[in-house]
Image (cartoon, rainbow, N blue to C red):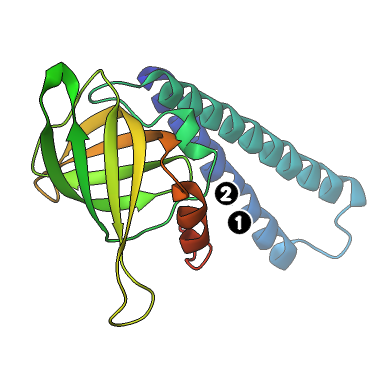
C-alpha cells in the first residue's frame, strides 16, 4: 500500500511538472509564434493539456482511494481512526475528560484533555498509554457557555479504536468511538457542538 501511494505520488508530481511545462510552452508560443500559427496546432496543444489534466485527476482519485482503504484497515493500537469517526464533522475543543475502566471488578480512572470531538467519537490526549478491549465510560466535562455557570458532565459508553504516541506533544492520543450516551448526553453534546465551527 505504501509503495502504491509512493508511486502514485511520484506519478502525480510528474504529471504536474509536465502540465506546467506545457503551459509554459503555450505561453512562450503565444509570444513568439507568427500570427499565422495554424488553428490545428493550437487545438493540439489544448488537447494535450486536457489529456494531462484528466490523467492527473484520475491519479489523484486513485491515490485518495488507496489512502481511504489504508485508514479503514488500520484499527487497534497504533492504527488509524475508523471510518465511523469520519462520518461526522470534527471540532477542536479543550475539555477535561476522565476515562473509567471497570473491567475485572475494579475501577481505574485516567485523565486527559479532548484533542478533537465529533458526534460519533472523541480523540483524547493523555499521559497514559490507554488501550482496553472492553468498553469504558468517557466522562466529558463541558465548560459553561456563560461565566460563572456550571460545567456539564456527559457520560458516554465507548470503545477505544486506536492509541498512538504523539511525538510533538509527548503524550498519547487515543481515539474512542461512542457506543451509548447516558441520559440526555447525546442531545447536550449536539447542542454544544452546534455552537462551534468544525475544522474537518
Is disc 1 surrounded by few (<14), some (14 to 19) or many (20+) residues within 10 Å?
A: few
Residue at 83% over, 51% down: 42
Rendered image quadrant of residue 6: top left
Left or right? Give the position of 75 relative to 190.
Answer: left
Which residue: 8% across, 43% down?
127
Residue 34 image point, x, y percent: 81, 63
What is the CA distance from the residue labelled 2 to the residue labelled 1?
5 Å
Side of 130 relative to 5 (left or right): left
What residue is drawn where x is 39% and y is 49%?
A: 117
| SS type, badge 1 | helix
Residue drawn 76% across the image and 61% down it? 33
Q: Which of the 4 image quadrants contains residue 102?
A: top left
Locate residue 91, reporting x and y percent: 42, 56
Q: Position of residue 121 (x, y in %)?
A: 40, 40
Question: Residue under circle 2?
Answer: 21
Residue on which disc 1 sits? 24
| Mark 2 secondary-structure assignment | helix
Binning the other alpha carbons within 10 Å of mark 2 as few (below 14), some (14 to 19) or many (20 upward) gives few
Q: On screen, 64 above or below 143? A: above
* In the rendered image, the vertical position of residue 102 relative to residue 152, given as above or below: above
**Residue that extends furthest to the bottom in the rendered view of this protein:** 147
Q: Nearer the viewer, residue 5 or 167?
A: 167
Amino acid at each position: 500500500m505504501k509503495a502504491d501511494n509512493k508511486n502514485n505520488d511520484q506519478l502525480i508530481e510528474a504529471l504536474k511538472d509536465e502540465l506546467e511545462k506545457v503551459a509554459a510552452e503555450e505561453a512562450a508560443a503565444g509570444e513568439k509564434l507568427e500570427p499565422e500559427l495554424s488553428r490545428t496546432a493550437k487545438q493540439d496543444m489544448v488537447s494535450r493539456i486536457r489529456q494531462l489534466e484528466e490523467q492527473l485527476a484520475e491519479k489523484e482519485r486513485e491515490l485518495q482511494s488507496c489512502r481511504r482503504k489504508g485508514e479503514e484497515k488500520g484499527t487497534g493500537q497504533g492504527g488509524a481512526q475508523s471510518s465511523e469517526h469520519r462520518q461526522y464533522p470534527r471540532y477542536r475543543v479543550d475539555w477535561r475528560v476522565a476515562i473509567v475502566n471497570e473491567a475485572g471488578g475494579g475501577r481505574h480512572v485516567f485523565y486527559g484533555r479532548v484533542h478533537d470531538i465529533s458526534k460519533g467519537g472523541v480523540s483524547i490526549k493523555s499521559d497514559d498509554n490507554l488501550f482496553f478491549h472492553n468498553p469504558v465510560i468517557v466522562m466529558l466535562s463541558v465548560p459553561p457557555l456563560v461565566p460563572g455557570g456550571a460545567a456539564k458532565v456527559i457520560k458516554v459508553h465507548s470503545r477505544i479504536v486506536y492509541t498512538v504516541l504523539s511525538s510533538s506533544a509527548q503524550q498519547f492520543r487515543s481515539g474512542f468511538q461512542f457506543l451509548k450516551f447516558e441520559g440526555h448526553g447525546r442531545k447536550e453534546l449536539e447542542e454544544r457542538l452546534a455552537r462551534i465551527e468544525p475544522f474537518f
